[in-house]
């Protein structure tokens, strides 16, 4: 049963949203990924959000470009944490319209928001949320953070060539 639901407004968003799925797969978190458009399939969006809990979902990652109503609308319909991924799409104003649409939610309907096109960060954040009650997952995240540190430390020799 998937723990994280990854949804996006259209198939063109998959190129970005796959980064969340790839991270979750790497760390061993089950997920599902599908298209749920707030504007073109509102009934599907309502159904997805209202049934997410009963379907075993614990966190929803919602990516959208342009007006980007998907994350906020889903957050209004579910008690689950929703992480918004603003997407710089073909009809976007450099992703700013998407970012502001997602981050400027009214009080009572929060949406955690990552940087434009930062679906991997949404995957990481969803795993961190799940790790609050999963020690094994928390250990995997600690290892991931150590790998990030090692990568930076290993790259020091490259920068030191310029001293």
Image: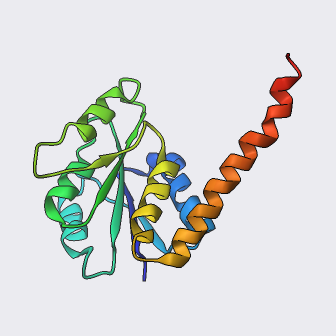
Residue at 20 percent across and 50 percent down: it is 110
Q: Residue furthest right?
A: 161
Residue at 35 percent across and 23 percent down: it is 93
Q: How many marks?
A: 0
Left-right relation of 36 to 4: left
Q: Nearer the viewer, residue 130 or 57?
A: 130
Placement of the C terminus among the 4 image quadrants: top right
The answer to which image quadrant residue 99 occupies is top left
How are the residues colored? rainbow
Q: Nearer the viewer, residue 34 or 76?
A: 76
Placement of the N terminus among the 4 image quadrants: bottom left
Residue 161: x and y in percent read 89, 22
Residue 158: x and y in percent read 85, 29
> Where 90 falls versus 62 (above or below)?
above
Left-right relation of 29 to 56: right
Q: Nearer the viewer, residue 42 or 93?
A: 93
> Where 145 falls versus 161 (above or below)?
below
The answer to which image quadrant residue 115 occupies is top left
Left-right relation of 21 to 70: right
- Let me know if residue 39 appears in the view: no
The answer to which image quadrant residue 54 occupies is bottom left
- Let me know if residue 3 appears in the view: yes
Residue 73: x and y in percent read 18, 53
Residue at 27 percent across and 73 percent down: it is 52
């Amino acid at each position: 049963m998937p723990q994280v639901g990854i949804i996006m407004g259209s198939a063109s968003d998959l190129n970005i949203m796959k980064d969340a799925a790839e991270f979750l797969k790497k760390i061993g978190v089950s997920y599902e990924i599908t298209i749920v458009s707030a504007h073109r399939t509102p009934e599907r969006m309502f159904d997805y959000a209202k049934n997410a809990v009963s379907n075993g979902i614990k966190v929803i990652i919602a990516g959208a470009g342009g007006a980007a109503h998907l994350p906020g609308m889903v957050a209004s319909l579910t008690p689950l944490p929703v992480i918004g991924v603003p997407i710089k799409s073909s009809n976007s104003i450099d992703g700013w319209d998407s970012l502001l649409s997602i981050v400027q939610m009214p009080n009572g309907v929060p949406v955690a928001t990552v940087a434009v096109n930062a679906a991997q960060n949404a995957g990481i954040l969803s795993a961190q949320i799940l790790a609050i009650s999963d020690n094994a997952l928390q250990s995997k995240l600690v290892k991931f953070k150590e790998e990030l540190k090692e990568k930076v430390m290993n790259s020091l020799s490259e920068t030191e060539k310029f001293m």
